[in-house]
Amino acid sequence: MCLGVPGKIVSVDGDIATVDFWGVQRQVRLDVVDEPVLPGDYILNHVGYAIRRIPAEEIGATLALYEELLTHTEADQDLMAADVRAEIAGAGDDR
Amino acid sequence: MALSVRDERITMKYGAGGRAMRSLIQEIFHDGLVTDDAPGEITLRAMDDGAALRLGSRWLVLTTDSHVVHPLFFPGGDIGRLAISGTVNDLAMMGATDVLALTCAVIIEEGFSRDDLSRIQRSMRLACEQAGARIVTGDTKVMGKGEIDGIVINTTGVALTDRVVPDSALGDGDRLIVTGTIGDHGMAVMAKRLGLAIEGTLESDVTPINALVRSALDAVPGAIVAMKDPTRGGVASALHEMAEKSGVGIIVDELALPVTDAVRATCELLGIDPLHVANEGKAVLGVRPDAVDAVLSALHHHPLGASAAVIGACTTARPGSIILDTGFGRRLLAEPEGEPLPRIC
Amino acid sequence: MIANGVSELKFRDPARARALADALEQTVESIGREVAVMHVCGSHEQAIARFGLRAVLPKRLNVIMGPGCPVCITDVPEVDEGVALARQGVRLATYGDMLKVPGSMLSLNDAQAEGARIDIVYSVAQAVELARRIDEPLVFFATGFETTAVATAAAVLGDPPPNFFVLSAHKYIPPAMEIVAEMPDTRVEGFLAAGHAATITGWGVFEAFVDRHQLPVVVAGFEPLDILAGLVRLVELVRDGRPAVENMFPLCVTRAGNLRAQQQLWRVFKPIGGNWRGIAHVPNGNLRLRDEFAHLDARRRFDIDLESLWDFAPPALVRDCICGDIMAGIKSPTDCSLYGKACGPDSPVGACMVSSEGTCRIWHQYGGHPDLGGRRGAFCAR
């Protein structure tokens, strides 16, 4: 629903994880997340509970989804979109 | 549909520095006290950071502030440091960067710790040294347990100056500079007060900035046409007041705002806008466009001004409104009412 | 600015956003008429408002805010229950969002001004910790949709102390979408579904909805790119006449969702019909504690005296509120007799004005449909 914020797990202690959100750390509960999580994993935090483990490989897939949208339209004429596609193509190699 | 119960009582929002507080002051406190000012004088009617009275060829600048922050001790400072910095900075915002003297009156709750009192006094002493100011007189009262919350400190500051800078003289094309990162104080205090158990480098920025402001004012005399310190209500409140009083609109470039990673992250987590969060060691300066580079350079050369940045410009369109350019689109920046609260939605 | 590796999760690249906004404009133009779609999440509206996206949306695309803000749709009697309890001397813990929402006459904030003890918490876990530290009862005013209800369920199942109670005003979104889709005269042609709720429920819950109403549903995240991409896809589906469910938030959403969270949710809560502020009766839209958890149900433990609140004349204004029609896209705020007069940000009557994300509130702030110029963004202050 609302205000879900992604963070990176620093350490796990039973049902509680210490999670890093862009440099600040907070404890997040693991009672409802449906996969085991390890330090280094990304999770989606909502009101102090991890509700999902975010698989790193999905990031590239999401960016590719957006790229598809751009090719469906007349965006070829738009130089900006060409830049964007180049960026996305470049980003895919990093993962 | 007025809620009569609420309106007959003064609730917390009336102390929060926003529209409600200004209405309260105008409706109750100005009654019978607002007089005609001599030319150039700034008094009660102006509701500026302080007052400026003619004294021969110079100006006598006065300001007073009562400090009730909780918790008393927070990362980066305490109520003592806040009491001195707040008043020194209010004087500086009027253009009076050389403090003549400060007073300090305290009201202490019965049972207050003597060690805490000493700690607070040491903070005040350090802040005075940093500001080049001294406390010359004061008052001490003790109230019964429960009659007051811990301690209340009132400080009054006095200074003489040749130049007075109001908060109401912005014109079309003037630029807005903020002297450093925003949201530091409010987020540090909020995280501590609400027990949010957020570990990270959240620290209040509370400090006297009169020397910093002096270097900016000296860089290009006359080029800084308005100043305000963004305390309660944050930069948003300060900009709203300046825009309203000056009769201009302001466009803010959100991507240019200096924000530390820790503040940005905590604001994201709690759903709070850094522009609404209090600062206690920063100033918003309205600067003539041709002087921006020189003023920015002077700020950058001062240890407290390393993160200074141009964040906006004044226009004639939509006077009194603040437009935020987010990099994706634009929206109106609302004036905050009351303390920002963490939200889930 | 963003220090560590989580930056790639923040889909906020302005160049990509501009390209998507252009794509959206072209797709709407290719339909050649006004298109109305609805989102059902307050956070979507928050994100749209916060990033100023309305200023760059195509003129012919009407993105309506549906009944998706838990703050707005928490009904008057529910707020009254919290206010009454607080005024009876019971200590309450609540999320910050609910503090200023008016009940029939008072909000929790008003009660606090009169001396009621109300603690603001960021997480229900914080409320449980508080209950452990004190001797008296602590009632957690549980508001929010299913995503937030999951946290409350986990707290209930996590062996809270005997002085911890829950006053549940939680809501469940899919039934509300049904109501909107079934409203006669509704002009909504597609729905943008909330990515975080779908993280819990899975996108599969929308398949039956799509079959029944033949309207497309696109699940979208909350960053500017997520929202723009979701809208592009949704408008494409509208253009092609394809009623389908599409998941544009694979980062967090799967077809089945989070089964562990769902199990906990439905073990603790049961859906019952109830009123949502401004939108009348929603079958199965409210979540209440099951009998197994009666021992921490505030409604069963405490005798909540609502009559004391009725010393203030109940407002007749609520009858004239047309928020339901506004949420369905049938009417505009300016069609409402109360808008801007009896109903304003300082004295809100209906859902759409209560929340900072409500349609009426946003119109009031912008003075109508926003037109702030600057289509290209990236304004340089120097």
Image (cartoon, coloured by chain):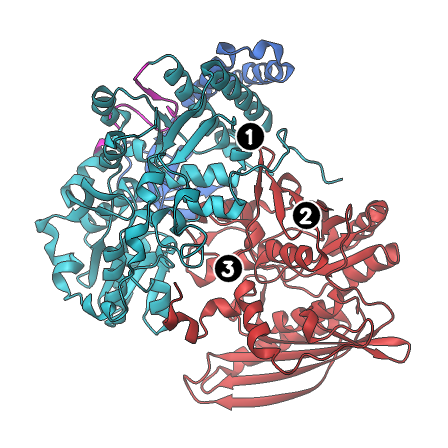
Q: Name the colour assigned to chain C in the rendering.
A: cyan
Q: Write down the chain letter for disc 2.
A: B
Residue type of the residue flagged with mark 3:
Glu
Counting other residues with Cα less than 10 Å from the Cα at mark 1, is it few (<14), some (14-19), or many (20 or more)? many
Counting other residues with Cα less than 10 Å from the Cα at mark 3, is it few (<14), some (14-19), or many (20 or more)? some
Identify the magenta region. C242-259
Please name the residue that numbered disc 2 is placed on. Answer: B250
Label 3's element?
loop
| Chain letter tied to red | B
Please name the residue that numbered disc 3 is placed on. Answer: B337
Please name the residue that numbered disc 1 is placed on. Answer: C56
Mark 2–mark 3 distance (CA, rounded to whole Å): 19 Å
Are both tags, 2 and 3, on one chain? Answer: yes
Left or right: C359 in relation to B32: left
Residue B190 visible in the shown view: yes
Which residue is at 59% across, 62% downward? B76
Where's residue B136, x and y in %?
Answer: 73, 85
